[in-house]
Amino acid sequence: GAGVSQSPSNKVTEKGKDVELRCDPISGHTALYWYRQSLGQGLEFLIYFQGNSAPDKSGLPSDRFSAERTGGSVSTLTIQRTQQEDSAVYLCASSPSSGAETQYFGPGTRLLVL
Amino acid sequence: GENVEQHPSTLSVQEGDSAVIKCTYSDSASNYFPWYKQELGKGPQLIIDIRSNVGEKKDQRIAVTLNKTAKHFSLHITETQPEDSAVYFCAASWGFNKFYFGSGTKLNVKP
């Protein structure tokens, strides 16, 4: 079946502009995660959605970052007033349910802020 | 919060040799430790995992060991092959809601 998909695959933007990154999880998966991966670094947790529960936003680095998940499926990560340090790969993952171990990752969106 | 450290950052081995990657964690409440393989241009993929009530787990050429007392866990790859070349990440989690990742190990298997 289809895996996790993310769009766009690459995004180049100018400093100060807003960007929206999209994640389509595997159908039926109730848990969704966003991570940021800077060049040569590990994955930094950003936000976690589980069903209809309030999301865990504890990893968002600043108030310029926000995310929403509509209808328990598609999620959008928005970065306002982008800065050069926001340049990274943004990865989305989904898992079947709360407490499920396996996360299935999408290919990521490579964001470059000029 | 949890802090996961991973070593080495790069590892080069000859085909057929073994490779070992080590991670330490700080939060004794962590109870789930997955390992991911990330190939160029792709998202990480789970290759093996271990829970805190188990000391060792093996899957063909891959094994993971866990020392809860010392708070460290290791990935062992035997009989390495060129297709094992990738970046490997360890992670730690409590309750599967939030995962803390190591900084990654770039493994190069030379034919």
Image (tube, rainbow, N blue to C red):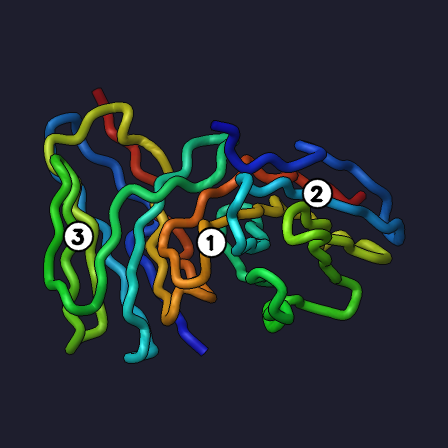
Q: CA distance from mark 3 to mark 1?
A: 19 Å
- Which sits in the foreground, A107 or B23? A107
Q: Position of residue B79 (x, y in %)?
A: 11, 31
User: Label 2 sits on what residue type?
Assistant: Arg
Q: Amino acid at mark 1?
A: Gly
Task: Give residue B36's position: percent from left, percent from top.
Answer: 35, 45
Mark number, residue A22: 2
Query: Which residue ends up furthest to the right in the rendered image?
Result: A16
Position of B88 relative to A49 (above/below): above
SS type, badge 3? strand
Q: Which image quarter holds the N terminus of chain B?
A: bottom left
Q: Chain of mark 3?
A: B
What secondary structure is marked by label 1?
Answer: loop
Measured in 3D between alpha carbons, the distance from the residue under mark 3 to the one under mark 2, in whole angstroms, is 34 Å
User: Where does the image place residue B91, in percent across and percent down from the top left?
Assistant: 36, 59
The residue that disc 1 covers is A42
Image point (29%, 60%), residue name? B33
Query: What is the chain identity of the residue bearing mark 2?
Result: A
Is A26 left or right of B75, judged from the image as shown?
A: right
State which mark lies toward you, 3 or 1: 3
Q: Is residue A57 above or below residue B9?
A: below
Residue A46 at least partly seen: no
Can marks 3 and 1 be said to lie on one chain? Answer: no
Q: What residue lies at 78% left-to-right and 37% top-to-bottom? A: A12
Q: Look at discs 1 and 2 and give the one toward the viewer.
A: 2
**Quick check: do tags 1 and 2 share a chain?**
yes
Q: Tell me, for residue B64, which label it has, or none.
A: 3
- Per the model, the C-alpha gap separating discs 1 and 2 is 21 Å
Label 1 near label 3: C-beta < 8 Å?
Answer: no
Using the image, determine if residue B29 lies above or below residue A94. below
